[in-house]
Image (cartoon, rainbow, N blue to C red):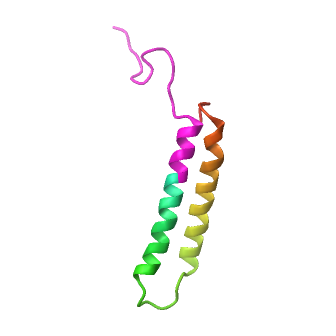
Amino acid sequence: MMLTKLGAMNGQDSGITKRQLGVFMALVGSIGFVAVLAIDIVDVGRQGGIGPAQFTALGLLAAGAVIGLTLIPLGDAPA
């Protein structure tokens, strides 16, 4: 009986590429950024505006989106 890995039946390991990872990170970062801002806009009646936790989340999501955008041009190299 021959044991094979499920993802590598053709002899090549087809993992995630830098382009795929970049697109994923850019989408998650930008959608998350818009979602955090939308939550603040929908809760208009609440005082305080954007607090420190939201500000930190916006910064991390923006950084993730920028890092994702820098990975896209690196092409089909394995991540």
Note whether 61 is above or below 16 in the view shown. Answer: below
- Residue appearing at x 60%, y 49% in the figure: 68
Residue positioned 58% across, 79% down in the render: 52
Residue 36 among magenta residues: no
User: For residue 64, what is the image quadrant?
Assistant: bottom right
**x and y percent of residue 63 in the render?**
63, 59
Residue stretch rendered in magenta on the structure: 1-26
Q: In which quarter of the image is the N terminus?
A: top left
**Above or below, 76 relative to 71:** above
Taking the spot 53% from the left edge, 39% from the top edge, the residue there is 20
Residue at left 62%, top 34%? 75
The percent position of residue 15, horizontal first and vertical second, equals: 51, 30
- Considering every residue shown, the one lying at the far front of the view is 73
Q: How many labels does the image show?
A: 0
The spot of residue 7 in percent (x, y) is: 42, 24
In the image, is 42 to the left or to the right of 70? left
Location of the C terminus (image quadrant): top right
Look at the image and say whether residue 3 sits in the magenta stretch: yes
Spot occupied by residue 60 in the image (x, y as percentages of width and height): 59, 63
Name of the residue lying farthest toward the left: 1
